[in-house]
Each structure stands twice: as structure tokens, then as C-alpha cells.
Image (tube, helix red, strand yellow):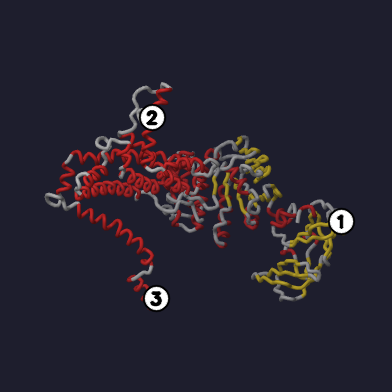
Amino acid sequence: MTQDFRELRLERVSRRFANPGQVAITALDELTIAIPRGEFVALLGPSGCGKTTALNCVAGLLPLSSGSIWLDDRRIDVLPPEKRGFGMVFQNYALFPHMSVRRNVSFGLRMRGTAAAEIERRVTKAFALVQLEGHEEKLPGQLSGGQQQRVAIARAIVIEPPLLLMDEPLSNLDAKLRLEMRAEIRRIHRELGRATVYVTHDQDEAISLADRIVVLKDGRVQQIAAPQEVYAQPANLEVARFMGYRNVLDLAVDDTSGDGVTVSGSGVRLKGVIKQPLDGGRAYAAIRPEEISLGAAGPNVIEGRVDNVEYGGHDSLIDVRTASDLVLCARVNAKPALGDTVQLTVPPERVLVYPHGAGA
Amino acid sequence: MSSAAEGVTRRAFFDSAWLLVSPAVLFLLLLFVYPFLYGFVLSFQPNEGGWPANYQKFFGDSRQLRSVYVTFELALPVTIINVGLALPIAFRLRRRTAYQRWVTTLLVVPITLGTVLIAEGMLTYFGPRGWLAQTLQLLHLYDGPIRLTHNYWGVLISLVISGFPFAFLLLLSYITGIDPVLARAAATLGANRWSQFRHVYLPLLAPGLAITFCLAFVQAFSVFPSAVLVGAPSGSTRVISIAAYEAAFEDYDYAMASTIAMIMGFGQLAVVAAVLGLRRGFYRGPVAGGKG
């Protein structure tokens, strides 16, 4: 397998599962994407959205139901996993429990019949890259979760794969280690200079790691875009919800002009932007808690009583209930008291309006 | 602090967990340890001669000594066949498929048949005028005489039929306990099917394989009914248990019978100890690939 490649291309890759006597389930529906060398792509979605299915299809662990996968001009979806030469990091690491850390890491090279001296050189390099020197002769069971994670990464990168696949590699680690390993993974990706496909259900992880995010839901692609865009301009209500737009208000459409729209209901009246063509008299307005602030500046002001306060150190997450029982969640710098009457404001360009047909 | 230390000391004298173990210990003492020691002592109290007379007599009698060879000659190949057949089949059936349950059921059926029933069936099927012989002759595939009963082969076949399901079930449970993600990880690292088996499954299976081998061997080594029913109990399949039976119930020499039983027991122990000793060289531990 050549290491020099321009891009990995997935063309309408689909995977259906069917049990005898049951309706077939489409786990992945026509995923098309081209990943150039050097790019870090995150597959993001809730559990059951098809992201691991997609990864397994690329790795060759699952056959495709339809579609094709190409590495430049070479069709690879017909090859068994051992012929593809992609490195894969599994969610539970899948380290060989009976082999020392060194033998785990050298496994891929030994399978390729690499010369002993070359194995030694590359394994040493891989240990240095994941900063695991000194643990070479231990068994995986003697390592901590974070160290096992590093062994799994070292084992996958030592074969110098054109593509590194990672299946929720941080989900078994505690919060602190997760942040450290996140930075590690980004560094390793940069140093390798190859492509990485990273599966996660954690939007923070996807945003901080990826050059591009593929948002999946029910096997379908919802949006493929850079993290900033997925974060600020979700393509539809599903993506918005998933990206942390916790306030989704069902309102009536009063007036539209170009991209601008005015929606109202339950005692509030908001100016916002249309993100998807509206299809009727009602619409959903999605607002991120972080973009609501205290005060009465601009056209969008909502008044209400503080219903709940979650103090979070440098800011607080508060629930504000309006006179007509609409509850808004906001992240504010102050720490208001329960029962206080406050005014909230949100800039119109941060009120994203989606059609009603997009689902509740 | 001091009271905790006292608590620890007290527990060393009497641990209430012993109460839970005591029925099993009592059972073992009464039904195994005592009869074993009784037989052991009895074997050194020959009807005539000094204390080692029975052992000297056994090892001096070529007919008796031969029964040890005969038994090993049967038990070792049978064990190797049973474990050797069970391993690839259990490996093939490690993943749940539509037909797995049926194949497993079919393979396990012989367990439900007694040795005697199997012997009866074999006499009808494999005998000189049995179905197999008749079919082969009818199809002119083989016209010579077929002697698969009342000799070595009869006992061997019978032991394979009755012993295979045990080996298969044991290995199946060991194999299905190995996390299949390990093999997938090996595949992504370039291991083909054989290498996945050789480098991942086999080493993790080695301890289970050793245990299966021991149990299958012990089972085959203590063969008695089929050696009589489908073998040649006075000749080529005069196994050691037949020798012990003859001493006890034909010569009424219980001391000699005990001696033979002891020799049989130590023969088994030698093989089991050798196999388990070999096992020490292999990895033993969890067979999953990381934090669960």
C-alpha cells in the first residue's frame, strides 16, 4: 500500500443490516466525501447514527451494501482489511493481552515481514511519538487506561498508514486525561501528516480536533463543514440541537425580508435569520445558551424570572421563565439569585430560524 | 487502629468463609480422599510377600504391563483426535449464525447417549454385516472385509463419538470468550485469517486447550465399557481398567486391584501434570483487549 496518496474518496457508501424476517435497517445512507492527505475528519453524531458503521466500512471490517471507496485511482472497498493497510484505534483499544507492549506495537510490522532492525527503529520512533518509553516490556494489563490508549495509537501508526481510523478512542478515559489525549492526538496527526478519520459523539471533541466535521443522524449526512461553520451555522435543526442549541422555540412567522425573519409567540418577539427555506406559518428558532446575555440591548429582549441556577465557576447556566411559561437557558457571567427578574438579550444574527417541517 | 489489627489476627484463626466451603470439603474427604488413601494403603498390603510385592508383580508381569501401553495407545490418539477435531469446528462456530445452534445441537447429541448405547449402535453400523459394510459392498467401493468392531478401532471410534462433544463444548466456551475485536484489530494490522488464528486466538486459547486436553485424556484413559463391548477385552484392548476389574472381581484380590488402580491414577496424573506444566509457559489472564 502506497503511503503517498492525494485523497481518500467515499462514493455513495451505504450499509444496510437485515435480519431474516425483519425490515432492513439502513445504518449508513450514501455517504460521499473526499478526504485529502493531511486532513483530520470527524464523524459526529448520536449513538446509532452510523458513524462507527462508516468507519468499519472504510477499515474493511464491514462489507458495503453499495457504493465504493477509492484511494486515489485504486478501488479499495473490495480488499480485505489486512490488504488496506489502514491503522485503526478501537474504542476498547483491543490490545493483544498476551503480548508485551513492544510486541503489540510491532505486530503490524511483523505481519508485513519487515526486517528486525527496521522494526526496532520504527517501534522506538513510535514509542517516542506517543511518549511511552520505559513501558515496552509490560503487558497491556499492567498499564493505565491512558497508557493503553497510547499503545493502541502507537500500534496503529507504526505501520505508517495513509489513513488513521479512530473509533471513539477517548470515551473510556476520565475527563482530565481525555483533554490531554485530545491534544496528543492532534499533535500526532500533525506530525504524521496523513489523513485521520475520527468517530465521536462528543461535539467538543469534534470541534477541537477536526479540520472538517461530518454530522450524521440515522445514517444520513446532515452537514459536512469546517468546525466553525457547523458550530455557528448548523445546516438544519437536528445539527443545531446536537451542536448545543438548547433553546428551540416553536414560534409563528410574522414577517420575512430576504434572510431576515421576525417570529413571535408566548409573549416573545424575536428577529432572526432564516437558515433553511421556511415552509409555512410556523418555525423553530434555535438559540445557543452562550449567545444570550443579560441586559436589554438590541431588538431581541426577553424578560423573565430566574428559575434555576447552575454555578459553573467562571459563568453560570440559568433557566429563565417568561410570564407565559416559556423557559430559556442562558450562560451568563453574573450569578443571579433564584427568583430575580432579569432581561435577556440575543443578537438577531444568532437567532437561527428553521422550517417547522424539519421535525420537533 | 489496634482494634482493626486485632480483627485481622482473629480472622486468621477462624474465617467464617470456611463454613461455606465445609460441605464440599467434607464431601471430598469422605468420597475421594478417604477411599483414595484406603486404596493406597491397601495396595501395600498384598495377599502374600512384602509391602511392594503387588507393584513388583504388576511390573514383572508382561501381560499386566501391556495393559498400561494399551491404555495409553488408545487414550492419547483419542484425545488428540477429539481436541484436534473440536478446535477447528469450535473455531468455525465461534460467531452466532443462523445454523450455529443446529450444528452445535447435532454435535452434542452423543453426550446424551450412554457408552453402552453407542456400542450397540456401532455393532449394528460398523459390524462385519453392518450398514456400512453392506453399503460399501453394494456400491462396490470396498469389497474386502470390514473389521471396525471387536478390536482397537472399535474402541477408538466409540471413544471419539462419546468424547468429542465434551472437548467441543469446552473449547467452544473458551473460544467464544475471546473478544472478536482482537482478531479485527489484527486484521487491520495486516494479519490474514491464519495469522489472526495463529497469533491471537491460539495463544489466548492455549490454557483452555490444555484443560480440555487433560479432561478429554482422563475421560479416555478410564475407558471400560466400550473396551469390553466393541473391543477385544482379552487381547488388543485389554486396558488397565479391565486389568483392575479382573483382579477385583475374578481373582478377588482387592489389594492387587487397588495397586492397579493406583498405577492407573499415577499414569493419568503424569500426563495431566505434564500438560499443565506446559501451560505455565503460556499467557494466562483476561482475554479481552482493554478496559471493558
Q: Nearer the viewer, mark 1 or mark 3?
A: 3
Q: Amino acid at mark 2?
A: Gly
Q: Position of residue B228 (x, y in %)?
A: 30, 39
Residue placed under numbered mark 2 in the picture = B130
Q: Which mark is residue A256?
A: 1
Q: CA distance from mark 3 to mark 2?
A: 75 Å
Q: Amino acid at mark 1?
A: Thr
Of the numbered discs 3 and 2, the one sitting upstream in the chain is 3
Q: Which mark is residue B4?
A: 3
Badge 2 crowding class, 10 Å Cα cut-off, few under 14, some 14 to 19, many 20 or more, is some
Tag 1 subunit: A
Q: Position of residue B185 (x, y in %)?
A: 51, 46
Q: Position of residue A184 (x, y in %)?
A: 55, 55
Left or right position of B70 against B173: left
**Residue nearest the observer in this picture, B174 or B256:** B256
Left or right position of A306 against B111: right
